[in-house]
Image (cartoon, rainbow, N blue to C red):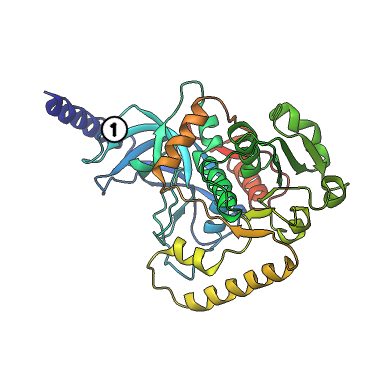
Amino acid sequence: MPALLLNLTRLTSIITIATRYSTEKIRMRSLAVRKYGKPSQYELLDLPIPAITNPDDVLIRVHAAAIMTGDTLIAGGLGRLFEKANFPLRIGLSGAGTISAVGGAVTDLKPGDAVYGAYFKHGIFPPPRPGFASDYAVCPAAFLIPKPAHLSFEEAAAIGNGQVVTATQCVRRYFELTGQPADSTLEGRTVFVTAALSNCGSIFVQVIKNVYGAERVVSTVSTAKVPLVERLLPGVVDQVVDYTTQDVLSEVGRGTVDLVLNTQKDMVGLFPLANPESGAVVSIASVPSGATVRKIMGTVKAPLLWLIISLVNVVHYWYTWKLKGTNVKQDFVSGNMGEREALERAGEWIAAGKIRAVMTVVNIDDIEAVRQKCDLVATGKGGLGTLVVRFV
């Protein structure tokens, strides 16, 4: 009987999506580029609805998609040395929606389920592009979790368990660098996080304070955003520094920070903040080591990969030189959604309300607004929280 019910559910799923295909002429709206380019070149195209070709995949009716820096980099040609893109290239690695159809091997999700997630993983390069900024997207079920009822689809897309998982992996790397057990907390510690109201920063400060219990969280914003920090993130950031009018090193104090968590380009400028005896700097926006590059790319055979690894290792030698005379450790962390346990744990924190959305929402049909907001994401200046594109 259970097997029969499962087969009936799948049959219903097939009939439902087939009907939708016929009524919508197997087309959908998709934010895409016809060639590598800047946000000003993004278009709203009429494209075929993607098909499930892998038994572990699901087809999602997207309600909202998050646009992150990585999305703009991919659309701009970041991976052109390692892959031949299939244009038009659909944008979006993260989003939220309802399941429309499931592959034959999927047993824990069914049509009608509300889910959210992000698809990026170490060891698969170039990775498939789900194109969440579309009416429909195909994604492996393993990268999705149920959406809590108290979250809107926009909020689920904005929180994006990808950022939560990455924040967790950054903290875990800090514990490794400083010789602490993996189940340690940040109680009694001071943590500096750049850009409290950015896409990643707004999530990172909440993970640091609300999950790991840091005693003191310090972060930066521009002048106009200073009063917004407590309004949007109540009780999370203990000290806000206006980086446009104040000297960060003077305001925070040299050598006073246990963990510097960097989400911006100038990581080296933050080195003096770290406690010279026991501090560490973990970054998601610096140059990765050669070992990390190999981990991200897996077994791919790419032209000039050896040269790229050599160059990034030279940069890391420079980092080491800049930290000479201290015991400060540093490393780059690339988020990996392939850790299902970390993904499920992040989902529990989100469901418990420990992390709230900070977001800017635009409708997909307002393509000019979408382009303008995507440009803020690409430049890293002027945006507020996570950019969410609404489809439904």
Circle 1 packing at 10 Å, graded few (<14), some (14-19), many (20+), is few
Return the x and y of residue 115 as percentages of the image width and height: 41, 32
Would residue 37 be seen by someone viewing this image from the given angle?
A: yes
At which x and y percent is residue 324? 73, 68
Residue at 60%, 29% in the rendered image: 356
Say which residue label 1 marks.
108
Measured from the top left, where is residue 121 in percent x and y? 43, 53
Residue 288 falls left or right of residue 392: right
Q: How many marks?
A: 1
Give residue 120's position: percent from left, percent from top: 45, 51
* Residue type at tag 1: Asp
Q: Is residue 285 above or below residue 307?
A: above
Indicate the secondary structure of the residue bearing disc 1.
loop
Drawn side of residue 248 relative to residue 113, left or right: right
Q: Quadrant of the N terminus?
A: top left
User: Residue drawn 76% across and 31% down?
Assistant: 228
Is 84 situated left or right of 375 in this image?
A: left
Picture quadrant of residue 284: bottom right
Front position in the image: 160 or 58: 160
Specify whether residue 79 is in view. Answer: no
